[in-house]
Amino acid sequence: MDRLKRYINCHVPITTCTLRCPYCYITQHRLFDGPLPTYQYSPQHVRKALSRERMGGICLINICAGGETLLDSRLLEYVRELLEEGHYIMLVTNGTITKRFDEIIQFPEELRRHIFFKFSYHYLEFKRRNLFDVFFSNIRKVRDAGCSFTLEITPSDDAVQYIDDIKAKALKELGALCHVTIARDEKDDSELPMMTHLSREEYIKTWGTFDSALFDYKLTIFGEKRNEFCYAGDWTFYLNLATGMMKQCYKSLYDQNIFEDPSKPINFKSIGCNCITHHCYNGHSFIVLGSIPSLQSPTYADERNRICQDGSEWLQPEMKAIMLQKTSENNTEYSFIKKLAINTEMYCRKNDLSLKHPVYSLKRAVYLATHNHN
């Protein structure tokens, strides 16, 4: 069985989108008319940079744009190369670009089994634009081709009145209810709170009726500042596909370009106990896939799968086997001394202190003494 070594959250700088969902941060910042990106490195070069040898094993790679991920046809060249390298690929999409799905189902069967689609259920926009038939037809198309998928809705106060129809359509078309995520208000950068005018109790009562493990887990971590030792930057990381810039997470204390020279090893550096985000709003991916091993969490498969009325599942066996794993199961936790070294270095970076600062010098002294160096 394939073992999951790392999770890569891969960003594609596409802000162009076919929809105008009010809860989307692209709409909030009015970025939806941006141009398609220029990729600085070829698909073959990127494959070398993300080779299994260089990554230390097989990766689960989430590919997501700010706008609609599949608008750019060139992206599929990168997807194909990474699949052929042996990685598992997740594609976030609004499900409306039919031509792209027609191209993907022409991939060899052994590659299709390693593709997972996160279909965003933008109910209000689909209703306004009469896109339900296109959307559900494309989901069934990739499902029947052997790909895995999930259906996920972002709660919107405007959609509350349609909840019964939201559920009915999902059950009719796909045999199970959609999962539910939590939208954050990007306009309030002080705390990135839930985007709703409902009280927390009303919000949970309203959207908790979907019996979604994704929603249930996000509620436990949303708004909670994380202070545990986090392996983001090593076991998980954030990557810009167009430039090769690797960050520890969305906000990072150590950045590097890992595409420039694929022959060089990557300097994986965890952020440790120095998280600089308000809260881990996407911990349903990072934490669940093992970035903070001290925290109990469901598996990624638990959050994404559904068992349908006919007994079938949204996750196919090979993808499900990967999503049942955590990176923490296939990596070795740092020693106390290494954690001390990481935390001290990241503390200095976080507080803009020189690495020659006494705090950092103390870390080096402890490290050298412990490792019997002169």
Image: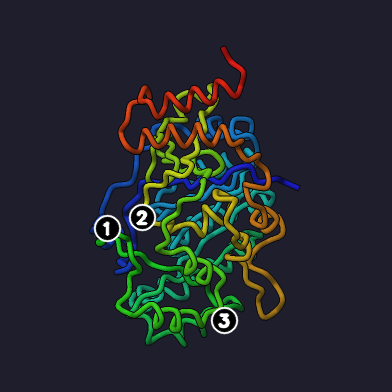
Amino acid type, label 3: Leu
- Dividing the picture into quadrants, the one containing residue 67 is bottom left
- Residue at (36% x, 75% y) in the render: 156
In this figure, which residue is indicated by the disc labeled 1? 190
Q: Toward the viewer: 162 or 228?
A: 228
Q: Secondary structure at mark 1?
A: loop
Amino acid type, label 2: His
Q: Does residue 74 appear anywhere in the picture?
A: no
Q: Secondary structure at mark 3?
A: helix
| First in sequence: mark 3 vs mark 1 | 3
In this figure, which residue is indicated by the disc labeled 2? 278
Q: Dot 3 surroundings within 10 Å: few (below 14), some, or many (20 or more)?
A: some
In this figure, which residue is indicated by the disc labeled 3? 171
In the rendering, at what x and y percent does residue 207 appear?
A: 45, 79
In the rendering, at what x and y percent does residue 206 appear?
A: 43, 83
Q: Dot 1 surroundings within 10 Å: few (below 14), some, or many (20 or more)?
A: few
